[in-house]
Image (cartoon, helix red, strand yellow):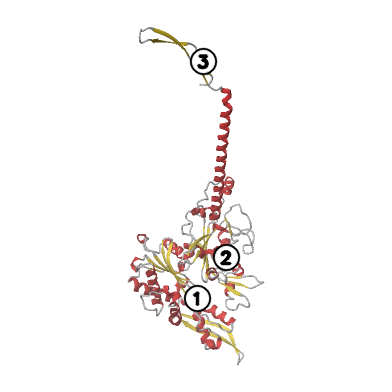
Amino acid sequence: MLGTLQASSSLPITSYDNDDNNKHSTTIQNRSYHATNRNEILPFIAAGVLIGGSIYTFRTLQQIDKDWEDYYNDLEEYKAKTGIDPEEQQSSSSNSNTSANRSDNANLSSFFTGGTLAIDIGTSRLKLSHQQSLSKNKNAKPSVIVDREGHRSTSAMAWKKDGEDILIGRLAASRSFDTRGGSIVHPQDLLLGNEEQTDDNNMAAIQKTLRDVASNALDQALGSSTGSFSSSNNPLFVLDTSMTTPGSYNVRPIITYPATTSGSPEDMIRYKQALNGLTSPDSIAEYVSEPVAIVSGAEYYNLLPPTSNASRPVLVVDVGGTKTQVSMVLGDEVSYSTSLPFGGDTYIDLLVSKLASDFFGPSAENGIDSTDLSAKPKLNDPTALQRLYDESTKSVHELSNKTRSEINIPYLTMDLETRQPKHLEVGMSRKVIDNEFESWLEDKLVPHLQQSSCSTSLSQALSPPSNLSTLFSSTIMSALEQTSMTPMQLRAVLVVGGGARIPLIQSSMKESVGYLAGELDKLVIPEVEVLGELCVLGAQLVKSK
């Protein structure tokens, strides 16, 4: 208790003597007890409170600064990963009257009012499909978009020459051999090739190709936007719905890429570079492995065996233009993949070689390279070679449905002795081209695959292939060996790709699967309508990561 405590009375105490029992009275006065005065201690208390409060406030501010720093670091990391700025979304949400949470990247596609556009960059063809936004139409289905000439695919090449416009699609394909000082750019070859080949000029040609075909598809699917698509330098795909710049769409791009055994993110570096300037922000594009997209499309169209076997892997054989990819797919993972250097275009090359040899004579006199694995002839007359290629392409397409085709090329060349034009008129049987392909396979392809760098493509337990059927058997067996599986464990063998329309491909696959599995119910070859489009359609259906 603060203040002065003072005794108010004396306390009498009585004592006795031991000898006579006499009493003695003694009085003891109370002591006074003194404490510090209230006014004297208050300054010390105030100083203690002030010092303690200052220390607490300083540490609190330090923690707040650290929390803000951590928050902005996390925010920048999130923005770099998703391309979304939550602070901008919060400020714009009041204007757009939306309460959606864009932080969920798995549902990012729902924020694109124009839906999604899938682009399948094949070895020889480009295919595109569009799907409306599921937030607007829950029953929206993907559909293939035709190009400006009404075809369901576009030639996947560009022709470039310094100082001239880059040619796209069929205009570029018409210069495949007659380049006249320019050069042909094959997007997928460069995107998967070495970094030195993918220079700024080649990348510009690839970006020009993607912008041209994608803008045409968006024009058809959603209607023309203000301005010119192909000439606009504005981003084609944008997330911001308030963006009104010419040639921009609130559409999410989905890019398919070939499967690689490594599965490393570096495999897609140049694919992402190819979209530079086409998207805003850069990270809104989605990338889907081709085999995964194919299986997803097959599931959607009910092409695979019942779902009771869904836990089993699917072996995908994708016969493209210049390559055949064999991949093992389980769910959204590719456990194994290998590439064989042949496809539908190989048939065309062999037919061109056959026609050139018959028409112009021995290859040694006309510059035809008989050792080239691609089987592409090299005539001294590039214009004649281009015309042979164009007509051979038509003939191979006909031979996919018929057993015989007529080839007529007037004024193919000039007879130097008689000064008269020479015309090519010949009937071509499917069996002749089949034999040419089987001979090329045995003489060139198999020895190439037997080299050490390609040894994993063929099974070590089987004899060297002698025809296409045994080649497929060896390749499939090698895939099973690499993944420690048996044919019975497969859910299905799914054959797709434009090159799979060739009858020899289908008949050889039936023989191969019958030999390995003993039953053909595992073999799935879709109808012609979706055979070459399953990848670009399935890319729309793969669950976003």
Query: What distance separates the C-alpha of mark 2 from that of mark 1?
Result: 22 Å
Q: Is residue 408 visible?
A: yes
Label 3, residues with CA under 10 Å away: few <14, some 14-19, many ≥20: few
Q: Residue furthest bottom?
A: 417
Q: Earlier in the sequence, mark 3 or mark 1?
A: 3
Q: Residue at x 55, y 60 (%)?
A: 221
The local secondary structure at tag 3 comes to loop
Residue 104, compared with residue 375, is above or below; it is above
Query: What distance separates the C-alpha of mark 2 from that of mark 3?
Result: 101 Å
Q: Return the mark for residue 434.
A: none
- Residue 116: x, y in percent? 52, 58
Residue 39, compared with residue 372, is above or below; it is above
For the residues labelled 2 and 1, say whether their Cβ atoms are less than 8 Å apart: no
Q: How many numbered badges does the structure rendering display?
A: 3
Q: What residue would you read off at disc 1? A: 345
Q: Earlier in the sequence, mark 2 or mark 3?
A: 3
The local secondary structure at tag 2 comes to helix
Q: Residue at x 39, y 65 (%)?
A: 314
Amino acid under disc 1: Asp
Q: What residue would you read off at disc 2? A: 210
